[in-house]
Amino acid sequence: MRADFHMQRLFVDAPIAADQALETTRTQVNYLANVLRMKEGDQLLIFNGRDGEWHATVSFSSRKKILLKPTRQTRSQTPDPDLWLLFAPLKVGRLDYLVQKAVEMGAGRILPVLTQHTQVHKLNIARMRANVIEAAEQCGILAVPEFDDVIRLDQLLSTWPDTRRLLFCDEAEETHNPLSALQSVKEKHLALLIGPEGGFSQQERQYLRSQPFVSPLALGPRILRADTAVVAAMAVLQATIGDWR
């Protein structure tokens, strides 16, 4: 079933079952009562990334406590997307955009990696998670992507699974058309690597190209900003060998 975008959706971090009331957080109480101005008996959709989507009724047990009472399941849980996104951390505003679009475009796991030209070395994990959840709420997504803490690229690749093809977007790739590179991919498990604003170093390019599970990928003759490159690369990948086929 398709998502119902006429009703408000809310992520809850608890198991969902019929007639089992769920407590909301202080932030959710403020959002439901003061932002959405919901009243006793109002209805919305809830999900937790595990138990599908449910129709729920709002119940005000006190001024500072709101319960959500699931009544029926509206959509069954979908499988987790299998596509991994690796990216070099960006500054806050553009990182918010990158994470939200990655969720919308079908990333199942989000992995921030440190490269030689990475400008940002620490991430606000709570803010990242909030952006992931917000994108899932707004876009009708049921499977909430996993995300990892920051790790060095070489450390991550040292334990990389051989069955997952890593497509690394390299502005120095001579073949500008990405379709031929994507059409030659035979693996079902895929990952996409987007570099930092300064690009990959020559040492990193050589290291990546030496790995048997890595394929370079160009995105045309133009140089894209890192957050734009994520959207462009995921769009091309999904349209060519993506999970909708």
Image (cartoon, grey):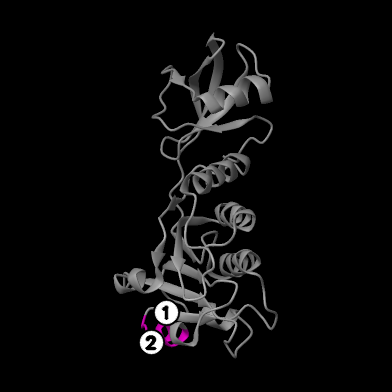
Count of marks overlaid on the render: 2
Residue nearest the viewer, comparing 182 with 222 = 222
Q: CA distance from mark 1 to mark 2?
A: 8 Å
Q: Position of residue 32 (x, y in %)?
A: 61, 23
Q: In screen coordinates, is 219 left or right of 144?
A: right
Q: Please state the extent of the stretch shown in magenta in the rendering.
A: 205-212
> Do tag 1 and tag 2 residues touch (Cβ < 8 Å)?
yes
User: Disc 2 on helix, strand or loop?
Assistant: loop
Residue name at image x 45 percent, y 40 percent: 49
The residue labelled by disc 2 is 210
Residue nearest the viewer, comparing 38 with 203 = 203
Q: Dividing the image into 4 quarters, which one contains the C terminus? A: bottom right
**208 inside magenta stretch:** yes
Q: Residue flagged by tag 1: what amino acid is it?
A: Val
The outermost residue toward the bottom is 174
Q: Residue flagged by tag 2: what amino acid is it?
A: Ser
The outermost residue toward the top is 62
Q: Position of residue 177 (x, y in %)?
A: 63, 83
Mainly helix, strand or loop, the magenta region? helix
Task: Identify the disc placed on residue 214.
Answer: 1
